[in-house]
């Protein structure tokens, strides 16, 4: 089990990096005038963006398993580029067309000015889907060569760049969507360049054989491998906008909630940011599975179960101690209704690691 841990722990640092980035975004948004509304609009925009972006989560495993030669890797890279462009189209439509505006109004019960804020975020972050697809291919090759430490360094560096950009945008008094969306876009562009450099430096294609897998590694083969995970991830992510759609319509139901819609959206956004650390930990099981599962299926399952128990205990500990208040109030700056909503939602997260492991 020790070899699994040595392979796995650098990948779990990615979850901490993701959480840290979200913490910073949430904290800065709440520092703006009308911070709860600013955070709520970002949360809604992200829920429209996430299903498409999350569908690409299987790309590192596609590269890990199927890229057994230069030609096979080239096929997976072209597939990733094409898939990311297709997945970007709905987000572009939401951001730039009148049809997209009507679609957002249908999904979320918002005023026109708030819809424009949501669309402003989407206009900036929509290219991130393609950037993510390509960087996942490059980091997938690094994981295939068991260079997980390099991937960790890349993610930590990306977090530092994101933090600097967000701080600079806030200090320059840029609007919230430019500060958060623009910083995210620029950091992903730099991450793509850095991951390509590291892939060529630490896992060059010269290490792969010259024999061609192109005859059998068709896009159909890649699709057959990828679509089950891609579809379950897409459906899981699609549940979020459905939940928030219901929440934004609660104002039409008198007495349906003790909290305002903005507070509920913002509070749940804080909790979903917190759960990324545990969600990310469990998601890294995919890399462990495709790397070691063929040789020691039972051992990998035991390792997964142990990590899942740890994650569940960790969430319970946060809920049962002052850590929950410290995270929400001190680290995130939540107060009033937003704090109360987030505090209540944290309890539901105890069920999450086990459910994700089984999935």
Image (spheres, rainbow, N blue to C red):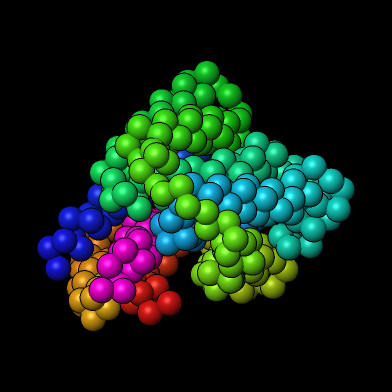
Left or right relative to 124: residue 334: left
Viewer-side residue, 73 vs 324: 73
Residue under the point 80% across and 58% down: 103
Q: Residue furthest front?
A: 211
Residue 124 appears in which quarter of the rendering?
Answer: top right
Q: Report the number of numbered marks.
A: 0
- Residue 318: x and y in percent read 25, 62
Residue 308 appears in which quarter of the rendering?
Answer: bottom left
- Residue 87: x and y in percent read 67, 54
Left or right relative to 65: residue 80: right
Name the magenta segment's main secondary structure. helix
Left or right relative to 184: residue 118: right
Q: Which residues are magenta?
A: 272-295
Please tell me whether residue 274 belongs to the stretch shown in magenta: yes
- Residue 342: x and y in percent read 42, 60
Residue 201 appears in which quarter of the rendering?
Answer: top left
Q: Residue furthest top?
A: 172
Q: Quadrant of the N terminus?
A: bottom left
Q: Is residue 39 visible?
A: no
Residue under the point 61% across and 44% down: 130
Please tell me whether residue 48 belongs to the stretch shown in magenta: no
């Amino acid at each position: 089990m020790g070899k699994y841990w040595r392979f796995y722990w650098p990948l779990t640092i990615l979850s901490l990096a993701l959480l840290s980035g979200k913490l910073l975004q949430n904290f800065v948004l709440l520092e703006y005038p009308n911070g709860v509304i600013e955070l709520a609009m970002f949360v809604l925009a992200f829920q429209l963006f996430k299903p498409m972006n999350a569908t690409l989560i299987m790309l590192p495993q596609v590269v890990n398993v199927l890229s057994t030669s230069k030609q096979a890797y080239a096929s997976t890279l072209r597939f990733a580029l094409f898939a990311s462009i297709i997945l970007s189209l709905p987000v572009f439509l939401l951001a730039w067309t009148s049809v997209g505006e009507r679609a957002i109004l249908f999904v979320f019960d918002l005023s026109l000015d708030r819809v424009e804020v949501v669309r402003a975020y989407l206009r900036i972050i929509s290219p991130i889907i393609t950037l993510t697809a390509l960087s996942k291919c490059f980091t997938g090759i690094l994981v295939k060569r068991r260079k997980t430490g390099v991937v960790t360094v890349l993610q930590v560096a990306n977090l530092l760049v994101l933090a600097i950009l967000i701080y600079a945008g806030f200090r320059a008094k840029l609007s919230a969507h430019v500060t958060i969306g623009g910083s995210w876009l620029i950091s992903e562009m730099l991450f793509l360049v850095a991951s390509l450099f590291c892939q060529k430096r630490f896992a060059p294609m010269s290490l792969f054989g010259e024999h061609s897998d192109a005859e059998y590694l068709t896009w159909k083969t890649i699709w057959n491998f990828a679509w089950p995970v891609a579809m379950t991830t897409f459906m899981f992510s699609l549940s979020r906008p459905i939940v928030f759609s219901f929440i934004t319509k609660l104002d039409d139901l008198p007495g349906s909630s003790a909290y305002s819609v903005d507070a509920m959206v913002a509070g749940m956004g804080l909790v979903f940011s917190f759960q990324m650390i545990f969600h990310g930990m469990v998601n890294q099981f995919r890399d462990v599975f495709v790397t070691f599962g063929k040789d020691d299926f039972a051992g990998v399952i035991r390792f997964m179960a142990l990590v899942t128990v740890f994650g569940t205990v960790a969430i319970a500990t946060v809920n049962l101690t002052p850590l929950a208040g410290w995270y929400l109030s001190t680290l995130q700056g939540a107060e009033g209704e937003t704090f109360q909503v987030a505090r209540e939602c944290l309890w539901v997260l105890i069920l999450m690691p086990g459910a994700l492991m089984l999935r």
